[in-house]
Structure formats: structure tokens, C-alpha cells
Amino acid sequence: MGEGPILVTEDLTKEFAGFVAVRAVNLRVDRGSIHALIGPNGAGKTTCFNLLTKFLSPTHGRIVFDGRDITALKPADVARLGVGRSFQISAVFPHLTVVENVRIALQRRRGNSFDFWRSKRALHDLDDRAAALVADVGLAPDVDTLAVELPYGRKRALELATTLALEPQLLLLDEPTAGMDREDIARISALIKAVAADRTVLMVEHNLSVVADLCDRITVLTRGQVLAEGDYQAVSHDAAVREAYLGTGHA
């Protein structure tokens, strides 16, 4: 894995009818790191994610991924370059099995839309890789379970498996532990740590114990601007961060 940043933004700005949702954000995500974006609701975190994955176009600024300017690219082009994203709301096919969901993602990675018209036997060529990904996220016992029947935490694990099937260099996770109980949070946190061994992770996360445990670097946003940046120890003791986000009762 190379050195230096895999993602850089320069003065990234997004305005909506005069409202500035993201203002001059300069972000540097180092290759091989786990980097968190935190901040109160409305701070601009999800807007930043939408800009990075090109679901939104910036009003001003520049986005560079792996040394290439991707500011003007379309979402599909950015995904093909190696940026994968999971969303706050689970996005799996509910009436397909766990392995079928992962296999569809593998088909997409191959880029052959005609796979959908091929025989089942041909599609089973992908089963070994799909089964391996399912096992990687701890879902081997559920390989033939319909996604709709999975508990919430396992459904999020399935979504992560389908994202990993696209073999992203940079994995963007939008609140990966939202709505989970303690057991599921522990499972997903361990999974994020494992998948980060050979890729970079940028995550939006409200659970500060998860951030403290996982993240090498943290960027704090408030009102669309960068308030502070550093490791957890530094940002959690920053007076401006404590006032804007953590509150006096949080260390």
C-alpha cells in the first residue's frame, strides 16, 4: 500500500439556494487509516459524503482521489475508481438470500450487465468468492437466509459484504453502528477494524466510544465547517469541540 493521502479535498463547498451546507472543507484522509467525520446533526457530514461520492456536485472546491481529480466525475465513475459507500439505511435486496445479494455485487464489479441473462450455472461461478465474503462478515450461518429475515445488525453486516464485493480502495461508512445493540456494535466494530487492514475507511459515526476505539484521525464538523482535527485524545479535550458537540459531560 502506497504512502500519502488517498483522498484530499480543497475548499470543498456546497450551497443550496443561499444556504451553505459545507463551507471550505479541507480534508486529508491518509492511505490505510480509519478516519472519522463527527459533529452534531446538521453539521454537514452526510453532505460531505454525498459530495465525495458525487451524488452532489460542489459549488466550489476540488476533490482528489488517489492522485486523480474526480470533482467532475459521475457517481458510477467514482465507484469504478475504487470508492465504495454504505448508507445509513440498509440497502440490500430483501427477498434474495444473503449469498445472492453478495453475488449480485460481484456481478456488478465484473461490469457485465448481461450476467443477469446468463444461466444459473454460470452465475454459480461466483459462489466461492461470495461465500468467502459472507464468512468474512460473520454471516456464514445465514448464507441461505433471506435478507428480509435478518436482524438489523446482521443486515448491516450484509450491506458491508456487498460493498466489499466491489473491492473499494476507500470505504465510506455512514453511521455503521446506528440503531444497534451493544453486541452488534462490537461485531461491526471488529469487522471494520478487520477490513481496514488492506483498505482505507472514512466513516460518519455518532457513537464516540466506537470512534475512540477505531479511528486514527477525527475531523469535527460544525455548521458545515471544520472545527478541529486530530486523534481522539486531542479533539475530545478541545474546548471548542466540547462546547459545540461533546458537551461538558463527555470527555
Image (cartoon, grey):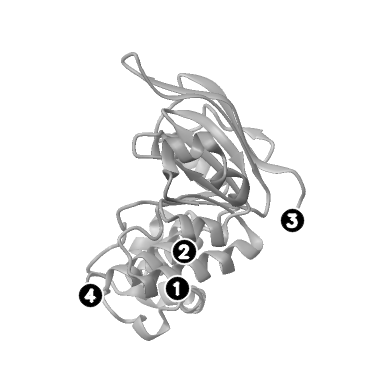
Asked whether the residues under the numbered discs 4 and 2 touch, taking CB atoms below 8 Å apart as contact, a structural biologist would say no
Residue at 53% x, 37% y: name it.
239
Check whether the beta carbons of the residues at disc 3 and disc 2 lie within 8 A of each other. Answer: no
Q: Amino acid at mark 1?
A: Arg
Q: Earlier in the sequence, mark 3 or mark 4?
A: 3
Disc 2 secondary structure class: helix
Asked if one can make out residue 52 in the rendered structure from this viewpoint, the answer is no
Label 4 neighbourhood size at 10 Å, few (<14), some (14-19), many (20+)? some
Of residues 76 and 188, the one nearer the viewer is 188
Q: Residues within 10 Å of mark 2 (few under 14, many from 20)?
A: many
Q: What kind of element bears circle 4?
A: helix
Q: Earlier in the sequence, mark 1 or mark 3?
A: 3
Disc 3/disc 4 C-alpha distance (Å): 38 Å
Q: Which mark is residue 25?
A: none
Q: Is residue 70 left or right of residue 51?
A: right
Q: Which residue is mark 2?
A: 106
Q: Earlier in the sequence, mark 1 or mark 2?
A: 2
Give residue 182's position: percent from left, percent from top. 37, 71
* 96 left or right of 249 in image: left
- Rounded to the nearest angstrom, the CA distance separating label 1 from label 3 is 26 Å
Task: Please say if 68 is above or below 13.
Answer: below
Front-most of residues 243 and 201: 243
- The quadrant of the rendering that contains the N terminus is bottom right
* Residue to which mark 3 is pinned: 1
Q: Dot 4 corresponds to which residue?
A: 149
Cα separation, mark 1 vs mark 2, equals 24 Å
Residue under circle 1?
187
- Point out residue 204 in the picture as x, y percentages from the top left corner: 45, 48
Q: Which amino acid, mark 4?
A: Glu
